[in-house]
């Protein structure tokens, strides 16, 4: 059985948590394959909202949940998340597996993240300060510590060696820190993590496939934050696009089945970097007011703008997206007109390609569609959807040449309309 992959197609926060939670009843195994606690995936059911950072969003169901080798784990955040789940009556010990090859975020990785960001001043990335960049840097630089290392006798030595390297690096920055308490908590949390089943996940996942288990891989961040294809350097430090699913789990490309792209009906971005269709006017504030666009991980206000089909088509191409889940359509319920960016003007030339130069001055070219001015947030069947909404949907499908399979009209599991 092939593995389906769900990916965010914008700058993150597209509604991946809700999407995975909604689809999990069709799957036996849910996996994460990249990113770490920079992610904040919300899901809502029975009137309660839950936010997950490291744990796959299938945890509220009976499926197996696997944290793959491509993920970076902060044991302290992991423990907090598990304890919160336990308070809700979920028993994660029975259904959560962790790859031995996943890398560990050390307390000093977090400090380095903060020191590096501070030193960048105005050019800061706007990182989530979870230690993501420094941890992936050590992974690629062949210095990292992995989950499997905690089972080895010389773990402490390996830890001290990496910490010493970090302390040397930190000397370059005028940044004060004190890790004594953090370190103790980190070590305790590692012991806690050892109580979970640590696995050679590449074997495990391929065994699941041989046994015809249905697997859904849950992307984190979004394709426009990909370290190769996003607006570098204003990106995260992992491959959020489809290749990351292969390397982050240990599966062959031909093992991939459906690629489910999740897209907001408009765009948001947290942190710095280009955002061609960003709104600085009343419409931007109206979007933010209506959808409470504040980060699930850091609480920062999200920058808001119109849907950008140039960027969307680019990532549909990169990922081989086979279907789209459109989320937050209800947020546009009260707009008289809705704009969609269909090309860019750069130096007086119209183009439908993303430029290499992130400093290029992009003038978005918009098509204006009639709003539906109806509360689709109360609708549950495709037959109920207003004509203007169907026009809007058709416009997107025609442009990106991928069908929309589900329209999400609210944060709750049930606020979902199946289009096929
Ligand atoms: P993720 O990181 O992709 O999982 O997305 P986040 O959880 O960070 O942000 C999405 C936000 O939108 C969360 O607060 C969700 O509860 C909420 N949400 C998801 N789908 C919908 C929807 O269709 N309508 C509305 N109004 N909110 C939604
Ligand atoms: P989910 O999975 C939105 C952004 C940060 C910053 C940049 C680099 O919830 O969609 P990092 O901490 O990764 O070094 O930050 O990436 N970023 C996200 N933005 N949603 C996320 O995750 C993000 N994870 C990182 O704001 O601009
Ligand atoms: Mg999020």
Image: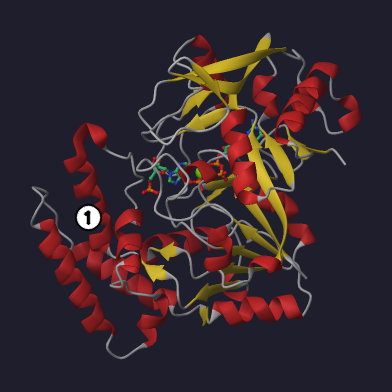
Q: Residue at x 70, y 67 (%)?
A: 254
Residue 89 seen: yes
Where on the picture, by quarter, is residue 190?
bottom left
Residue occupied by mark 1: 112
For the N terminus, the image quarter is: bottom right
Q: Is residue 50 above or below residue 288?
A: below
Looking at this view, is 403 or 36 the one in front?
403
Q: Residue furthest bottom?
A: 153
Q: Position of residue 338 (x, y in %)?
A: 66, 15
Q: Residues within 10 Å of mark 1 (few under 14, many from 20)?
A: many
Give how far across and how far down residue 383 sits, in percent: 91, 28
Q: Nearer the viewer, residue 349 or 169?
A: 349
Q: Residue at x 66, y 15 (%)?
A: 367
| Image point (43%, 18%), residue name | 347
Left or right position of 393 against 156: right
Instruction: Determine whether, in the image, residue 180 is placed left or right of residue 226.
Output: left
Query: Where is residue 413 drawn, in percent x and y?
Result: 72, 44
Is residue 48 in view?
no
Tell me where residue 386 appears, x and y as whole percent.
84, 19
Q: Is residue 419 left or right of residue 105?
A: right
The quarter of the image holding the C terminus is top right
């Amino acid at each position: 059985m092939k593995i389906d992959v769900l990916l965010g197609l914008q700058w993150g926060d597209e509604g991946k948590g809700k999407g995975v939670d909604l689809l999990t009843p069709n799957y036996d195994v849910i996996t994460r394959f990249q990113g770490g606690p920079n992610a904040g995936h919300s899901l809502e059911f029975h009137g309660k909202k839950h936010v997950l950072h490291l744990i796959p969003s299938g945890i509220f169901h009976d499926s197996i949940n696997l944290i793959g080798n491509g993920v970076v784990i902060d044991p302290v955040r992991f423990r907090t998340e598990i304890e919160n789940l336990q308070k809700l009556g979920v028993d994660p010990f029975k259904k959560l597996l962790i790859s031995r090859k996943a890398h560990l975020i050390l307390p000093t990785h977090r400090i380095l993240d903060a020191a590096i960001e501070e030193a960048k001043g105005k050019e800061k990335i706007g990182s989530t300060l979870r230690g993501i960049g420094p941890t992936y840097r050590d992974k690629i630089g062949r210095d990292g510590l992995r989950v499997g290392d905690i089972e080895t006798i010389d773990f402490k030595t390996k830890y001290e060696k990496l910490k010493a390297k970090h302390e040397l690096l930190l000397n370059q920055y005028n940044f004060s820190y004190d890790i004594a308490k953090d370190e103790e908590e980190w070590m305790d949390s590692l012991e806690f993590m050892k109580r979970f089943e640590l696995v050679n996940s590449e074997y495990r996942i391929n065994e699941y496939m041989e046994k015809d288990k249905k697997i859904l891989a849950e992307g984190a961040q979004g394709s426009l934050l990909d370290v190769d294809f996003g607006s570098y350097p204003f990106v995260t430090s992992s491959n959020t696009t489809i290749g990351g699913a292969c390397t982050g789990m240990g599966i062959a490309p031909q093992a991939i089945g459906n690629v489910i792209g999740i897209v907001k009906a408009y765009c948001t971005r947290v942190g710095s970097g280009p955002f061609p269709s960003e709104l600085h006017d009343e419409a931007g504030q109206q979007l933010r007011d209506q959808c409470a666009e504040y980060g699930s991980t850091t609480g920062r206000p999200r920058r808001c703008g119109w849907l950008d089909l140039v960027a969307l088509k680019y990532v549909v191409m990169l990922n081989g997206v086979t279907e789209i889940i459109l989320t937050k359509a209800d947020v546009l319920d009260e707009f008289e007109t809705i704009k969609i960016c269909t090309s860019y003007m750069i130096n007086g030339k119209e183009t439908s390609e993303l430029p290499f130069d992130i400093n290029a001055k992009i003038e978005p070219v918009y098509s204006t569609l009639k709003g539906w001015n109806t509360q689709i947030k109360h609708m549950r069947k495709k037959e109920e959807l207003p004509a203007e909404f169907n026009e809007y949907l058709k416009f997107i499908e025609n442009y990106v040449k991928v069908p929309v399979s589900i329209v999400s009209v609210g944060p709750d599991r049930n606020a979902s309309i199946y289009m096929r």
